[in-house]
Amino acid sequence: MEPALPALGGASDAPSLLELAFTEAAEGAGQDDETTRRVLDAAYDSFQRIGIKRSTMADVARLAGVSRITVYRRFASKDVLVEHVVRREFRRYFDRFILDIQGAETVADRVVLGFVSSLRAIRHNPLIGGLMAVEPDAVVLSMTGDGGRTLAAVRQFLAGRLRREQQAGTVSGDVDVEVVAEMMVRVSASFLVVPSHVLDVDDEEQMRAVARRFLVPMLEPPGPTLPTVPAVPTVPAQE
């Protein structure tokens, strides 16, 4: 099956869309000129209304009020245009995540808010969330068919936030933030791509409770190692 987001993971030797979006969000990049913004907005509108496969460069040019030549000058092919539209959506996701957790008073609150914010931002995104509803298999393939690089980009982003918590003294230095970020990202990804028959992912109160019960404890330092109990010597039976 051809992925709905064909370049989400990128080539094996090139950064994935999520890696690029993460870098742009971290550096405050992504300022496009007016014409480029119009083309990206038009492509976004076309993709969510009639789908990526059915949209053409001519459709995008018409919606943007520019010529096809103008579109091709900025985006050499439809695949390149798709990459930039999706990358912008993930960049907005990273920006939204940072804003959502800023008002939280404790690291536990930031974990809970970040978890719920992630689910909401992607599931309710008209483009990405819509594709997940209409073509879930294709989206899963796009996210998992790149050797784990898509999830690794999100893990890198989250691990960086957790390191800031360690530097601020709100998370113990004994916590392995790479492992914690890996577990949190995989939990979130599973809720996004695999329907749950136990939990309502759109029930934010319920998902906050899940995060507080199962994700927040991951930030606790590992407990002391229990001493090894020496083996009891076997006493030979008396004859």
Image (spheres, grey):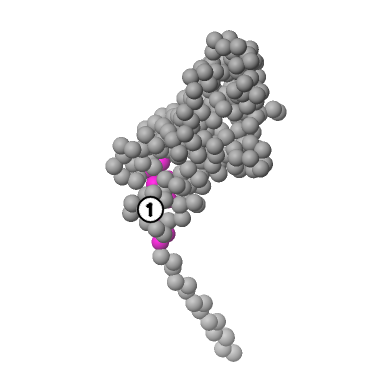
- Which of the 4 image quadrants contains residue 82? top right
Q: Which residue is mark 1?
A: 166
Figure check: 130 above or below 199: above
Evaluate whether residue 32 shows in this view.
Answer: yes
Q: Residue furthest left?
A: 105
Relative depth, front residue between 57 and 224: 57
Give the residue type that dot 1 points to.
Gln
Residue at 54% over, 37% down? 20
Dividing the image into 4 quarters, which one contains the N terminus?
top right
> Magenta residues?
211-223
Q: Taking 214 as reference, is 46 left or right?
A: right
Residue at 63% over, 14% down? 68
* Residue 213 magenta-highlighted: yes
Figure check: 108 above or below 131: below
Relative depth, front residue between 2 and 221: 2
Figure check: 2 above or below 166: above
* Residue 28 magenta-highlighted: no
Q: Residue furthest right?
A: 1
